[in-house]
């Protein structure tokens, strides 16, 4: 691997006081459908209903069965709730999930760059020139080929299906560019390494790179068909809404779009909008390509590209100040785009975000 930072290069003392990058991955939400025996797909709606569950709180302070029974008399064992679910139609043969993605020209990534009180316009112009030159070198060499293969693999392996992937018996992913479909068997495609790409992955990566290099018609339409090995109205998993002040007795709210079906019985199950995965959740999965962070050799698990290596799953930051995207960006003028730090920085640019250096 090439050296990340040339020793003779002088990094910028600080990042510009105002610095923001606009994301280079343009995504739609992913809509859920029930695939019917004749090939027809019908929208899969979120439904709201009541359940009578049990209390599941770790409050027991005694192993004494009699004490547990006595304690139960002081509070309800039942847990009556309103909750949202999403289930396949009774006749469905598979779940279908669809979204669109397009990668945008990296040359337009710089959204705002302005001085703080401690910056001069000479500093700002030097940083802009260094960032532009770094992106230019990435486009000319093989850096974007390497990076695009990682995004392609995360489309192919269905990582973006989240919990639905873990319960599926088989998943076929189709990525269509124009009228040309590329087929992938998701469960046979690796999740935590990006070695040995297939020719089909390379074909998809070529389109991703073309988008990052400025080709505007590099649209990719992604469709996954999941079979679960059971028949009937099986529960599937769209995004969940996180609510700060949930109404008492309300358990879970699911993400849904569009209008609810009309003329429903007000005393029965209430169908809401169409189930979907949020674009942010899909984007997080597609950018789970960071195997460059220091602890990867020990953990063996890719994490989403975040400037500080933030992982919600592990509830940890995996990058220190010296390995963060903020510090690496200070070295942008001397960074090899094909190096580990260069690849990570390119992925941070595609992610977008605020990198302002303030007045310090």
Image (tube, rainbow, N blue to C red):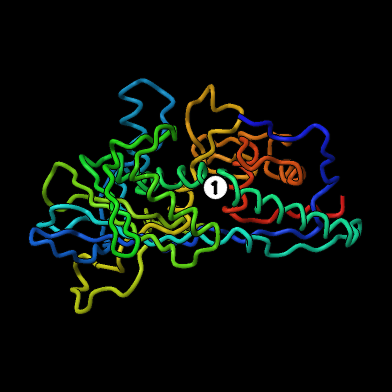
Residue 220 image point, x, y percent: 38, 60
Asked if residue 166 is positioned above or below residue 225 in the image, the reply reads above
Residue 223 in the figure: left or right of residue 228: right
Asked if residue 108 is positioned above or below residue 146 in the image, the reply reads below
Q: Quadrant of the N terminus?
A: top right
Is residue 82 among what the camera can see?
no
* Foreground pick, 102 / 240: 102
Residue 190 image point, x, y percent: 36, 34
10 Å crowding of disc 1: few (<14), some (14-19), many (20+): many
Q: Residue furthest front?
A: 140
* Foreground pick, 70 / 116: 116
Residue 223 image point, x, y percent: 29, 56
Residue 58 image point, x, y percent: 42, 33
Is residue 349 among what the camera can see?
yes
Residue 230 in the figure: left or right of residue 173: left
Q: Give the number of marks.
A: 1
Which residue carries the number 1 mark? 144
Residue at 46%, 42% (x, y): give it: 150
Residue at 62%, 61% (x, y): give it: 22
Residue 118 in the figure: left or right of residue 301: right
Residue at 48%, 47% (x, y): give it: 148
As helix, strand or loop, the secondary structure at mark 1 comes to helix
Residue at 24%, 42% (x, y): give it: 168
């Amino acid at each position: 691997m090439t050296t990340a930072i040339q020793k003779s290069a002088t990094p910028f003392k600080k990042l510009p006081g105002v610095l923001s990058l606009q994301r280079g991955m343009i995504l739609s939400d992913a809509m859920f459908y029930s695939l019917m025996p004749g090939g027809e797909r019908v929208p899969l709606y979120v439904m709201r209903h009541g359940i009578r569950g049990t209390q599941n709180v770790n409050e027991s302070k005694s192993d004494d069965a009699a004490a547990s029974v006595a304690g139960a008399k002081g509070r309800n064992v039942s847990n009556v709730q309103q909750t949202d679910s999403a289930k396949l139609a009774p006749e469905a043969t598979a779940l279908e999930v669809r979204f669109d993605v397009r990668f945008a020209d990296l040359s337009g990534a710089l959204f705002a760059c302005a001085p703080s009180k401690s910056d001069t316009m000479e500093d700002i112009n030097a940083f802009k020139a260094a960032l532009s030159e770094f992106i230019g070198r990435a486009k000319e060499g093989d850096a974007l080929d390497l990076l695009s293969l990682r995004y392609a693999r995360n489309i192919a392996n269905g990582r973006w299906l989240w919990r639905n992937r873990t319960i599926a018996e088989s998943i076929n992913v189709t990525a269509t560019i124009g009228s040309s479909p590329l087929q992938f068997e998701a469960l046979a495609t690796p999740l935590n390494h990006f070695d040995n790409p297939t020719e089909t992955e390379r074909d998809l990566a070529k389109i991703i790179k073309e988008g990052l290099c400025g080709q505007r018609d590099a649209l990719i339409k992604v469709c996954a068909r999941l079979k679960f090995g059971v028949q009937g109205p099986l529960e599937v998993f769209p995004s969940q809404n996180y609510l700060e002040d949930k109404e008492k007795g309300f358990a879970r709210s699911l993400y849904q779009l569009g209008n609810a079906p009309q003329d429903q019985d007000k005393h029965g199950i209430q169908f809401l909008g169409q189930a979907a995965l949020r674009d942010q959740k899909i984007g997080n999965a597609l950018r789970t390509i960071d195997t460059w962070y220091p602890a990867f050799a020990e953990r063996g698990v890719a994490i989403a590209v975040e400037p500080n290596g933030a992982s919600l799953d592990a509830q940890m930051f995996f990058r220190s100040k010296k390995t963060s995207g903020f510090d690496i960006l200070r070295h942008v003028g001397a960074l090899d785009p094909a190096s580990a730090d260069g690849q990570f920085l390119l992925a941070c640019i595609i992610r977008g975000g605020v990198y302002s250096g303030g007045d310090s």
